[in-house]
Image (cartoon, grey):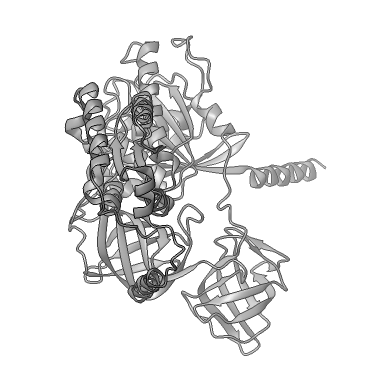
């Protein structure tokens, strides 16, 4: 009876472990922020370290902590890491508590190893960004935070470490919390939790520290155990990239792969790409037998009722909600190799098990990691981040990265060295050159066939008695509103717009429509304080629409100047809009 009870207890234990949620998280931040020490402390205080591991660390000749045990050595396992006191490669550690199971990716902080950070964060549900309380936010802190936002990590924990060095002062934590919250807002990260910790002493890691009575929030472990875990994808449509075709004998032909989005059941209709043939699922086979349903992240083999030609790299999708199918697209790229990205050079793109030849045709902008502004560039060097347009020899079947991580990402490979040189998060499909030419021809035909009843921009200018114009303002919202009131009181029809409220994809059509109405557009950077950034593509759009009637009052030399002087300048410019006539041109939306 005792043996039976023990076996039941063991089975119950294993079942409970299997039912626990799994949280994948990564640590990131700058050099010497204490990432490895924090993970070592977390594992040690959760009693997730085996005795032989502790013995090995105690015997190590390397100890930079000043304590009896250097906890960073529990994750820094490479000889070079221990000798230099830095993290070089991604180290994965596994542990569990009564509530959850965890997989930790300890990533390096050196700029040289940014590519390793991107690798470790690519599968994470949560990013733990460490901030040294004695140094504050550093360039690598911003770079890693930006990469976390690019990778779609929705929850970020800012661990303000080394509070013992800062004498556990509340004002230090409050200042850094405000700094990081401001950075997160600019990056579009909405779920942010800031926790003051001391990895060396153990305060607020697993147990609450007595030296910070002013902090009443959760400890690091409490937050990890309760943070919501998002699903692998919010998509309901099926995405099933085929990895291989299984045909052990003439009576069976199955297509093996992993469900990237949605779910599939026997009898479901599917669309095969690129052939666009339709079929129905006959069965879902696994090593353990047939399934009635397969969902996200399950590796299964599908058999179809129809005999259609499929091979590795093809994809089965929902017929009523297919992905983009295009050989031209834009993507955010993190460059991982010492050799810079070269435009029009042929690379190999690996996307969902498919290899195609690809080349970068245009760099839209490069991200200045210090200011997060978008700068024009003609090259992309190692650890740089940029928006790039690509062309491939064969069309890819993809969704935007925001919708699906699997079908919305790819890696770039140098075909000569076989080195992985870049990681790309796909954004949108682009029309090919032929489609662009057809669209332009159609528009010209539409303009040529415009009837006499169409109201032209010149007629609107004549009625309003002023020409349209665009002003770019990096002022506070209050100053921008004051300018609009002054112009309106002088008889000019105006519209004040905050750029951050207008989706990037809709800006061209939106501003084109306003321009064609013949009004004065005041484009504000969107910051309440006036310290926001205008992106190069916004300025390019304004130049294209307004030409000489675009007035840039958001340059660096302006933002630091006297607001009243620029206010008066804007009023003088506005008066010239009355004196000029003709020359306005209707813009294409």
The answer, for residue 534, to whether it is visible in the render is no
Q: Residue 412: x and y, percent?
A: 31, 63
Q: Residue 244: x and y, percent?
A: 51, 76
Quadrant occupied by the N terminus = top right
Q: Residue 234: x and y, percent?
A: 58, 52
Note whether 432 is above or below 49 in the view shown.
below
Which residue is at a point 72% across and 74% down the rendered structure image? 267
Residue 562, quarter of the rendered image: top left
Count of numbered marks:
0
Furthest residue in direction right, as rendered: 1
Note whether 239 is above or below 574 in the view shown.
below
From the viewer's side, name the closer residue of 422 and 494.
Answer: 494
From the viewer's side, name the closer residue of 135 and 83.
Answer: 135
The answer, for residue 483, to whether it is visible in the render is yes
Q: Residue 387: x and y, percent?
A: 31, 54
Residue 444, quarter of the rendered image: bottom left
From the viewer's side, name the closer residue of 145 and 437.
Answer: 437
Quadrant occupied by the C terminus = bottom left
Which residue is at a point 57% across and 83% down the rendered structure image? 247
Which residue is at a point 29% across and 39% down the rendered structure image? 471
Which residue is at a point 55% across and 27% down the rendered structure image? 222
């Amino acid at each position: 009876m005792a043996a039976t009870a023990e076996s039941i207890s063991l089975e119950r234990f294993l079942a409970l472990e299997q039912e626990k949620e799994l949280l994948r998280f990564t640590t990131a931040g700058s050099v010497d922020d204490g990432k490895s020490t924090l993970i070592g402390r977390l594992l040690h205080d959760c009693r997730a370290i085996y005795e032989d591991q502790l013995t090995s660390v105690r015997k190590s000749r390397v100890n930079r902590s000043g304590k009896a045990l250097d906890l960073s050595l529990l994750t820094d396992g490479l000889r070079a890491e221990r000798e230099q006191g830095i993290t070089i490669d991604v180290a994965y550690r596994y542990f569990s508590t009564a509530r959850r199971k965890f997989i930790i990716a300890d990533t390096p902080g050196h700029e040289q190893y940014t590519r390793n950070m991107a690798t470790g964060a690519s599968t994470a549900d949560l990013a733990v960004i460490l901030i040294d309380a004695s140094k504050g936010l550093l360039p690598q802190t911003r770079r890693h935070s930006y990469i976390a936002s690019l990778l779609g990590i929705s929850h970020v924990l800012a661990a303000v470490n080394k509070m013992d060095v800062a004498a556990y002062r509340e004002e230090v934590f409050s200042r850094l919390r405000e700094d990081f919250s401001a950075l997160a807002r600019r990056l579009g990260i909405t779920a942010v939790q800031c926790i003051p910790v001391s990895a060396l002493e153990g305060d607020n890691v697993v147990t609450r520290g007595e030296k910070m009575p002013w902090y009443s929030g959760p400890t690091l472990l409490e937050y990890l155990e309760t943070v919501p875990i998002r699903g692998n994808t919010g998509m309901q449509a099926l995405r099933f990239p085929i990895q291989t075709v299984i045909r052990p004998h003439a009576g069976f032909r199955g297509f093996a792969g992993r469900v990237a989005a949605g779910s599939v059941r026997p009898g479901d209709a599917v669309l095969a790409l690129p052939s666009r043939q339709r079929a129905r699922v006959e069965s879902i086979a696994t090593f353990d037998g047939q399934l009635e349903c397969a969902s996200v992240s399950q590796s299964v083999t599908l058999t179809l009722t129809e005999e259609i030609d499929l091979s590795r790299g093809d994809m089965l999708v929902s017929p009523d909600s297919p992905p983009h199918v295009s050989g031209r697209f834009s993507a955010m790229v993190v460059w991982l190799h010492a050799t810079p990205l070269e435009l029009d050079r042929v690379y190999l793109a690996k996307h969902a098990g498919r290899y195609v030849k690809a080349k970068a045709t245009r760099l839209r902008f490069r991200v200045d990691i210090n200011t997060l502004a978008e700068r024009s560039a003609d090259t992309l060097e190692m650890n740089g981040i940029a928006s790039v347009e690509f062309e491939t020899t064969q069309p890819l079947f993809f969704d935007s990265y925001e919708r699906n991580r699997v079908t919305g990402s790819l890696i770039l490979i140098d075909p000569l060295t076989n080195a992985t040189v870049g990681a790309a998060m796909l954004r949108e499909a682009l029309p090919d050159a032929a489609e662009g030419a057809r669209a332009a021809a159609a528009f010209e035909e539409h303009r040529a066939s415009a009837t006499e009843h169409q109201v032209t921009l010149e007629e609107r200018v004549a009625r309003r008695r002023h020409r349209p114009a665009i002003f770019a303002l990096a002022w506070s919202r209050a100053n921008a509103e004051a300018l609009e009131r002054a112009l309106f009181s002088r008889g000019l029809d105006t519209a004040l717009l905050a750029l951050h409220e207008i989706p990037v994809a809709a800006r061209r059509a939106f501003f084109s429509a306003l321009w064609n109405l013949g009004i004065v557009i005041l484009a504000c950077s969107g910051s309440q304080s006036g310290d926001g950034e205008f992106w190069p593509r916004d300025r390019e759009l304004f130049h294209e629409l307004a030409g000489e009637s675009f007035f840039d009052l958001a340059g660096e030399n302006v933002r630091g100047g006297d607001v009243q002087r620029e206010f008066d300048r804007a009023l003088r410019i506005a008066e010239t809009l009355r004196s000029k006539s003709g020359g306005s041109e209707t813009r294409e939306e």
